Amino acid sequence: MSTSKIQPVVDLDFASLKWWWKEIRRPEAFDVTAELASQYTPDPKDEGDHRASRESIREQWYPASRFPSEVHVELLDREVIPDPYVAFHEHDVQWVGETEWLYTCTFDAPASKEAERRLVLDGLDTLCDIYLNDAKILQTDNAFRQYTYSEAASGVLKEKGNILLLHFRCAKKYATEQELVYGKVRAGSSNLGDPSRVYLRKPQYDWRWDWGPELMTCGPYRGIRLTTYSVCIDKLAFHPSAQLTVANGAYDLSLSVDLRAIGQDATLADVKVVTTLTDADEPKTLVDVFESVGLDTSNGTSKPVASWQRLQDKGVEPWWPVGYGKQKRYIVETRILGSDGTLIDSVSKVIGFRSIELVQEPLEEADQYGTGSTFLFKVNGVEMFMGGSNWIPADNFLTTITDERYRAWLELMRDGGQNMIRVWGGGIYEPDVFYDLCDELGLLVWQDFQFACGVYPAHDSFVDSVRQEAEYNVKRLRHHPSLALFCGNNEDYQMVLQWGDVSDFPAIVIYEEVLPKVVQALTGGTVPYHRGSPYGGKGWDTSDPTVGDVHQWNIWGGKELPWQEYGKLGGRFVSEFGIPAFPAMGTVKHWMRGVDPREWYAQSKAIAQHTRAGAYERRFAIVMNENFRVTEDLEKQVHAFNTQVMQAEAVGYAYRVWKREWRSEGKRYCGGVLVWQLNDCWPVVSWALVDYFLNPKPSFYVIKRELASLTIGVVREVIQDRPNDRPKQFYEYGATRSVGAKIHIWVTRTGGQDSEPLNARLDIQCFDLEDPDWHKAHDFSNAPQASMFAVSPNGTTELGTFECPEPGPLREGVYNRPGSTTSSGRVVVSARLLHPETGEVLARFVDWPQPYRVLDIPSASDAGVEIEVEGAPEDGDYALVKVRAKRPIKCLWLSVDSDEGGAGDALMKGAQAVRWSDNALDVVPGDEQVITVKGWNGGKNKAAKVNWKILQN
């Protein structure tokens, strides 16, 4: 075969075809011919009526509204089912997941004696029998892998009028049948859906989770294409690497590209292979390799086509996570050319050069938990504190998540100061756009393999399917510089240990043999592997705070301790923890549509329908009663807002005290914190920082402040007249008497690569909540230098311990009579780090006495809140909002009419939502704060009213 006969590769994208769908009439007696003979309903664009009925979809084919497609989405579009995200309608659509469905399309495939044709299916959910011209050609049982069919296998393709039919079978039924064969196992609590889910490689959250609905989706949820070729690039494998020497800042970069070519002849003489490396930010080719080689394709073997050393000499720079440097990316492209220069095939990837290590080394000294070892990430030779979130699928209906929504989510995360996202193991391997955006935005990805909270099987066919799933996804993802870790599972080790029978854990062969071998073989060690999350290694003790990572659920769940105890509940890396809260009120109103108005209270059936957390009523009551004055007023938003303040205070405190443990090299007692969770998959009361419609909760902004590169932390230690079991931050007004308080202050500095100390001045201001005239600054006059500090880079600097001042009695009363609790229980402490010359505020934190329920917090009318808006230029799309207060205020929440509960809806329709640079502010007199607001449509809304509310008692 000479190269003159080689034809260029041609791809037919099936998204360009007309697709049809219907419900199977008789699943027990499925007949391809009979179903294809059913009537085809004309396109509603021509007929003017888009609706269908349960009866008609059994008898007729309907044109798909989109491709890729899912049945629920098609049924929603036809108004066959109600919106399962609203009211109680989730229960009205369960029949969809218990039914079998068909998709079909017709296509042409011109024949060529010199060409081979291959059908590639990138994602089918999940059990699918695939027919081509009435012949069954494939059967799938794994939603997480790609399936291919080669025409050479059967020769059923025709030049014209080929019919592809996809028969999606019932996932629930199959899983139950597998359970009967292999045995019933444990798989989390009842909140996590039926345990039979472990037998099917389908997104596990489809069965229900403690934040999501039960919606058993099915359909061709990712692309399908037909490739016609004589020779093509099957895989482009490369191993970008970087080694950075911290001492002199020099680095070496190397790149190798492997080409796998497949053809019908064993040898293709004089095929030219061109490989280039181009800067992704500017059209500049850095390296160009041109080879004329014969490719041995008899076995589809791999062939190296390029090897480059010391690419920094060509101008290549490393890729850095956000906050540490530029996200430099490069395009590597390999092309096959015929002898006459004709382009036969090409494959390109956007890559970046970085080294990443998971460092688990002995610590120099013990902390409160003991010695143990680190669990931290080192990127390009720099130890980095990881602050971020866990990620679940952004929708139960995956085909509705647009690229724009992915960008909005991940930009929000980046703008929130976060640098790592954990793709949780009960969802999906996200599409390419997700990882492309993480590369662009500098977000490191902790990637779970898709196993969660269960005893998974390990029979031969299951393990073989998992191996193919892992190989496909590791090959697909390995080139991304953002990829920081592959992790074997979510909480499977923990669950087995918790249930007490570690001998009954068949999937250990998957987590400790199959997956690590795949990762090592396909990444060459450039991506670390961790057996599971959490996992420590010592006899599977998944809660050992001295090794590995931990999931900290002893506040919400477990021991149900006060959130003020988070400082005692850390670990070397906290990869899950959280507290739930209500979403924006507009999101609540969205799911309450059509619900009886009598359901508008916090403990109603309609609220329970959209609150999946186990025992949430009791747990909410405990945490809320302990910290806030209790109200069930949902209509006036007081209860919902108070849960948001609760979440913000709890997770903010956890980030603050755990980040403090990023002490110094050799003493990295906590290497990172990932909150559960960033996002939602439907409108719900959950742990999410940002609700389904992309409305941030107060916790999002509190965490953003805690993840700034320079933060100041304060913890108040109240002195009691006798020991008790209460949080050290609580003032006591009963059997125990509080006699004073100490203020502990520190600074943590992360981000960047600056190795020099930062000089700064400490400013402490104190205010009485009940006496607007009492104000006291900490007096450094006797030792002015005592307020000056050199803040160490990449670590924590302790600034000292200070006595909390005592304002003294205000009036005769229960709280102020002689011998009662210390009057420091009324004092709000503002700690700021200032530039020593300009006085610029570098970091601030306001510490309040606790618990909040006993405080006489100034009312909204007495707080003296002043909000000044400086509009943007006419062509601008931002404004500055200046905030001041005459009395201390807690959690000042700002909004404008266009984003009060509606920002998410607007965004999902393509409009730009209003976004605040900061919010949920603690403000004290004399400390003006300035916020940037984007999305105000230029200068048109300069005079727009800024709404606000604060925590009140």
Image (cartoon, grey):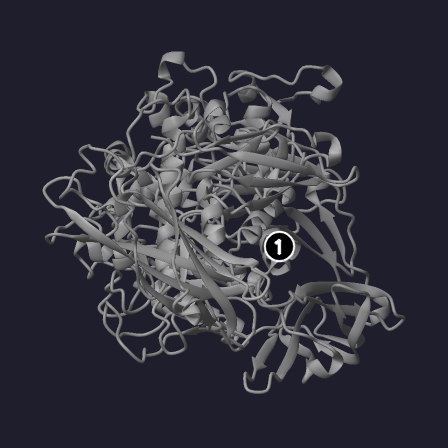
Residue 383 shown left or right of residue 48 in the figure: left
Q: Where in the figure is residue 108, as x and y percent of width and height?
A: 75, 42
Q: Quadrant of the N terminus?
A: bottom right
Residue 287 occupies quadrant: bottom right
Q: Is residue 886 visible?
A: yes
For residue 145, above or below residue 64: below
Identify the secondary structure beneath mark 1.
helix
Residue named by callout 1: 437
Q: Nearer the viewer, residue 619 or 862?
A: 862
Residue displayed at 64% across by 30% down: 64
Seen from the viewer's position, the closer of residues 270 and 589 is 589
Q: Nearer the viewer, residue 744 or 315?
A: 744
Q: Quadrant of the C terminus?
A: top left
Q: Is residue 446 visible?
A: no
Residue farthest front in this picture: 782
Q: Residue at x 30, y 60 (%)?
A: 570
Q: Is residue 871 left or right of residue 505?
A: right
Which quadrant of the figure has residue 115?
bottom right
Q: Residue 474 location in percent, x, y?
A: 52, 63
Q: Quadrant of residue 160?
A: top right
Amino acid at circle 1: Leu
Query: With respect to residue 227, does 337 lie above or below?
Result: below
